[in-house]
Image (spheres, grey):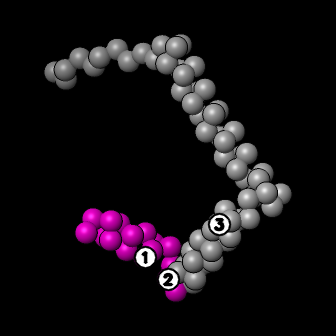
Amino acid sequence: PAPPLPHLHLSDEMTNEMAAFIQMRVNNLFSVSQDIALGKDSRLFLKVAAYLLLISVVGGFTDFPTLVYTSKFLSII
């Protein structure tokens, strides 16, 4: 017979802490995104634009599955 499974339970406190953590991170992301969109942080805007351009150029050379396999291979090395 299969071994008995333990009873899994999330407490209300743990759920509330996770929700507050996720809410804090999402609000921070929205704040940074708003600053970029309004032009308040031009240096960060240029970084984001450069990374998106780099991703676009690399993505134009290859298809997505090949890019994922190559990234995984390079991360292992």
Residue position for label 3: 48
Q: Amino acid at mark 1?
A: Thr
Q: Are marks 2 and 3 in contact (CB under 8 Å)?
A: no
Give left or right: position of 67 versus 32. Answer: left
Q: Amino acid at mark 3?
A: Val
- Residue 57 sits in quarter: bottom right
SS at circle 3: helix
Q: Are marks 3 and 1 in contact (CB under 8 Å)?
A: no
Furthest-right residue in this view: 38
Residue position for label 1: 66
Expressed as whole percent of the image width and height from the top left, the position of residue 60 reads 57, 84
x 27%, y 65%: residue: 76
Q: Earlier in the sequence, mark 2 or mark 3?
A: 3
SS at circle 2: loop
Image height of 24 relative to 6, above or below: below
Residue 71, magenta (yes or no): yes
Expressed as whole percent of the image width and height from the top left, the position of residue 11 reads 48, 13
x 65%, y 66%: residue: 48
Q: Which residues are magenta?
A: 61-77
x 59%, y 34%: residue: 22
Considering the whole magenta stretch, tell me its main secondary structure: helix
Give left or right: position of 31 versus 15. Answer: right
Query: Marks 2 and 3, how far apart in space?
Result: 21 Å
